[in-house]
Image (tube, grey):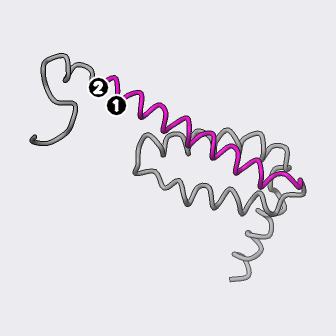
Amino acid sequence: MIGGIAGVVTAVRELPPESTQQAVGYPSLFLLVALGALVPVVPTGAIVSSAAVVAFHQSSPFSLLFVFLVASFAACLGDTALYWLGQRGSAPATARGGSPRCGPG
């Protein structure tokens, strides 16, 4: 048990600096949230919550604001891309004389 705690303490001491965490964290957050907007199986709520917890413990006062802005922009961009894909896919259906709605009627 003591070896496990010592290993955790050693791992925490060897964390990369905040600048490296931010340089990797914000682009990763953006990509994962944008992917979550396109593929609804990706748990974006857990990703954004985890990023917010990490940002809260940073020394920069605007880290939490940056997480909110990056996640909001990525979600908006992902939703726009999904809307564009849906519009692009419905054009051939209406050109063939089909209904743009799903289902009977």
Q: Is residue 72 magenta?
A: yes
Element class at badge 2? helix
User: Relative to 97, does residue 18 appear above or below in the rendering?
Assistant: below
Marks 2/1: CA distance? 5 Å
Residue that appears at 47% across and 43% down: 37
Residue that appears at 9% across and 42% down: 104
Please name whichever residue, 10 or 69, is drawn nearer the observer in this view of the structure.
69
Residues under numbered marks 2 and 1 in contact, where contact means CB atoms less than 8 Å apart: yes
**Image-based side of 94 in relation to 86, left or right:** left
Farthest residue to the bottom: give it. Answer: 1
Residue 96, numbered label: none
Instruction: For label 1, count other residues whose C-alpha is less than 10 Å away and answer few (under 14), some (14-19) or many (20+).
Output: few
**Image-based side of 74 in relation to 100, left or right:** right
Q: Amino acid at mark 2?
A: Gly
Residue 77 in the image: state x and y as whole percent.
Answer: 55, 35
Quadrant holding the C terminus: top left
Provide the residue span drawn in magenta: 60-88
Please name whichever residue, 1 or 19, is drawn nearer the observer in this view of the structure.
19
Farthest residue to the left: give it. Answer: 104
Residue that appears at 19% across and 23% down: 93
Quadrant holding the N terminus: bottom right
Q: Quadrant of residue 29?
A: top right
Q: Quadrant of residue 92?
A: top left
Query: Can you identify the residue that label 1 sits on?
Result: 86
Residue that appears at 89% across and 55% down: 61
Query: Can you identify the residue that label 2 sits on?
Result: 89
